[in-house]
Image (cartoon, rainbow, N blue to C red):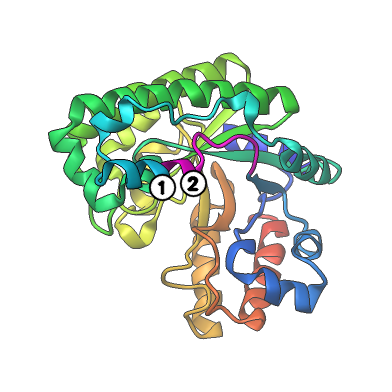
Amino acid sequence: MTSTERVKRAIRGEKTDRTPIYGWVFANLSEQITELYGSVEAFEDKYAFDAAHLFGGAFPYRQEQIEALKEKHGELTPDILLEEDFMVPVSEGDWESLRVSLAHHKARDRFCYVQTPGFFEHFNGIFGIENQLMYLLIYKEELAELYRRQAEWTVEFADVCIDMGVDCIHISDDWGAQNDLMFSPELWKELIRPNLKRIVDHVHDRGCLVSLHSDGCISKVTDDLAALGFDMLHPWQESAGMSYDLYLEKYADKFAILGGICVQTALGLLPRDQLEAEIRRVFSTLKGRRWVCCTTHFVQDHCSMEDLAFAFDLIYKLAREVSP
């Protein structure tokens, strides 16, 4: 069974030969991993990662253009942005690095998912999170139009990626704080849900999978995410009140989890014996379910190489153990 087949079967809830594994290790630890293993790619090969999180291709705007608009207008608000030609066509993106990365991982038969920005998280990069939370109330109609345009852009982005051979479109759109959504579920349903539906339906029509990343507690909208047809959610953050009991009771037949190894409470933080107990607990809870074992976010740079190796040695072993 190839890694791509293994991950797809796990996402669909079908029997696999073992638990698929992955980890977000490169963003903060590339230098340390390279010094010890030769490269991040060598670390991924050592632990036989089954998936690859790809970045690249087109991006909807150029930061220097947004900075020029801010200088021109002072405070850049949604009504002003709607009047500006700020979105970069998908066709003008630099796709070469994504092609190279995809070829590298597909040579290893890995399941490849490519990240694309969502809506709230994406426009935080333009407005700032505090401003956008305010704009959700005072510029709701304008944000609705900006989100709609972003959804149409994402559909075009997805088409190029799917034509290239990616296995999954991964929408990154953080909505959760530690204990709740950062804004009301009513606003989410009005402004974000219709645009997610546009993308999910299109990606599925193209025969491709679609996944979502959102940190924090998003339990107030997980019914909607299931109804929209998401195939996989990352990270299902247990440390933010998203219990695995809730997942197993309500959603285990709806979508898969990508996650399980918490970077907020466990990896790089716990003593080895407690870290081992925590990883074993997660495996005993999720193994054999619709689960791809992964870190809940990028491993932070306070995690030592010794702790990282300890964790992935154990993950590698547990993924291959036959369940009783």
Contact (Cβ within 8 Å) of mark 1 with mark 2: yes
Q: Residue at x 37, y 58 (%)?
A: 238
The residue singled out by tag 2 in the image is: 64
Label 2 environment density (alpha carbons within 10 Å; few <14, some 14–19, many ≥20):
few
In the shown orientation, is residue 97 left or right of residue 119? Answer: right
> Which residues are drawn in magenta?
56-66
Label 1 environment density (alpha carbons within 10 Å; few <14, some 14–19, many ≥20):
some
Q: Residue 23 occupies which quadrant of the picture?
A: bottom right
Q: Does the segment drawn in magenta span residue 1?
A: no
Q: Label 1 is placed on what type of residue?
A: Glu
Q: Residue 38 occupies which quadrant of the picture?
A: bottom right
The residue singled out by tag 1 in the image is: 67
Q: Residue at x 64, y 28 (%)?
A: 92
In the shown orientation, is residue 136 left or right of residue 16? Answer: left
In the shown orientation, is residue 54 left or right of residue 178? Answer: right
Where is residue 97 drawn, in percent x and y?
Answer: 74, 43
Does the magenta stretch mainly form a helix, a strand or a loop?
loop
